[in-house]
Amino acid sequence: MRFADSVVMVTGGASGLGEAVARRAVAAGASGVAILDANAERAAALAAELGDTVLAIPTDVTQSDRVALAVDEVVGRFGRIDTLVGCAGIPYATRTVDREGAPAPIDGWRRIIEVNLIGMFDVVSKASAAMSRNEPGEDGERGVIIMTASVAAFEGQVGQTAYSASKGGIAGMTLPLARDLAALGIRVLTIAPGLVDTPIYDLAPPGLKEQLGQTTVFPKRLGRADEFAQLAEALAENAYMNGEVVRMDAAIRMAPK
Ligand SMILES: NC(=O)c1ccc[n+]([C@@H]2O[C@H](COP(=O)([O-])OP(=O)(O)OC[C@H]3O[C@@H](n4cnc5c(N)ncnc54)[C@H](O)[C@@H]3O)[C@@H](O)[C@H]2O)c1
């Protein structure tokens, strides 16, 4: 599935990795790009900057009825959805038992699973239902789904039980989703990024980004958001890639802290 002349829907598309995908899809000549993001203002500003082929739909991925309406709106405007790139997600850190001996508050833990894992599945299933109505292309392909996990799916650090569980859930559901959706001609892939320079590091203390950049094997720097978008495009284009979790991490293996 090429980005050119196709419809690309991006959750979390107003910032960071998702924004880079939206920009790349526009540059590649996508016929429609839909940005679904909880940050309505940022999504609208980006759509206004990128032009007529871009539609911003304020959507919180944990609101199932809003997700359904958003998918309908994309199909109403552009006629179909060919590729979904799921980037909506939030970080979170809390120790299982804190320094005072108190157990972790369960509401924060539950929220991460709601947004990162259940929200991802809900968007995937609703977008897949829309893709199932596409005319099949070569090999009978009707669509491609690319989810975003994290290397924390495999090497969660101290405090990352909830985040790792949410991302491990995405990694774990990649193959069964590919199997479920094979009959519809939909491929499913996951990218597990390492440390990529996006607004999630905006609040980092001075010097931290440079320090983190030294923790990779090679190259010794943070990843660039467009490197993620480039991989998403390559995975969408390569018809033989399916059911796989691909790390994009300069060979980093996260330490316990
Ligand atoms: N940047 C990294 O180093 C890195 C590494 C591994 C994984 N990731 C994952 O990549 C994804 C994107 O991260 P990013 O670095 O671009 O972060 P970001 O904060 O720049 O972008 C995330 C976007 O998701 C949106 N969002 C958050 N909650 C939402 C919700 N409930 N519904 C809809 N939209 C919502 C935000 O408004 C934001 O625009 C996340 O899932 C993150 O966990 C990032």
Image: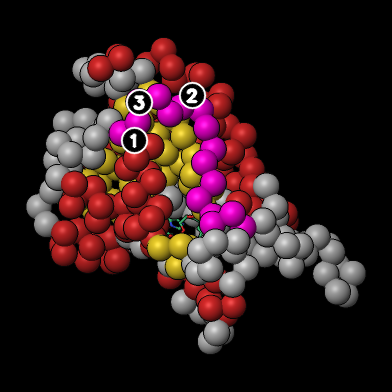
Disc 2 on helix, strand or loop?
Answer: helix
Q: Residue 128, position in %: x, y?
A: 37, 27
Determine which residue is flagged by label 1.
236
Identify which residue is drawn at 14% across, 40% down.
31
Q: Residue 15, position in %: x, y?
A: 36, 62
Q: Which quarter of the rendered picture does the C terminus lie within? A: bottom right
Q: How far apart are the alpha carbons under marks 2 and 3?
A: 13 Å
Tag 2 and tag 1, C-beta contact below 8 Å: no
Numbered mark located on residue 178 in the image: 2
Q: Please say whether residue 66 is visible from this viewpoint.
A: no
Determine which residue is flagged by label 3.
239
Identify the amino acid type marked 1: Ala
Span shown in magenta: 236-252
In the rendered view, does 92 fall on the left or right side of 94? left
Residue 175 appears in which quarter of the rendering?
top right
Query: Is 35 rendered above or below residue 7?
Result: below
Q: Nearer the viewer, mark 2 or mark 1?
A: 1
Identify which residue is drawn at 49% across, 19% down.
180
Identify which residue is drawn at 44% across, 52% down.
88
**Nearest to N terminus: mark 2 or mark 1:** 2
Q: How far apart are the alpha carbons under marks 2 and 1?
A: 14 Å
Tag 3 and tag 1, C-beta contact below 8 Å: no
Query: Is 234 rendered above or below residue 57?
Result: above
Q: How far apart are the alpha carbons under marks 3 and 1?
A: 7 Å
Disc 3 on helix, strand or loop?
Answer: loop
Identify the amino acid type marked 3: Ala
Identify the amino acid type marked 2: Ala
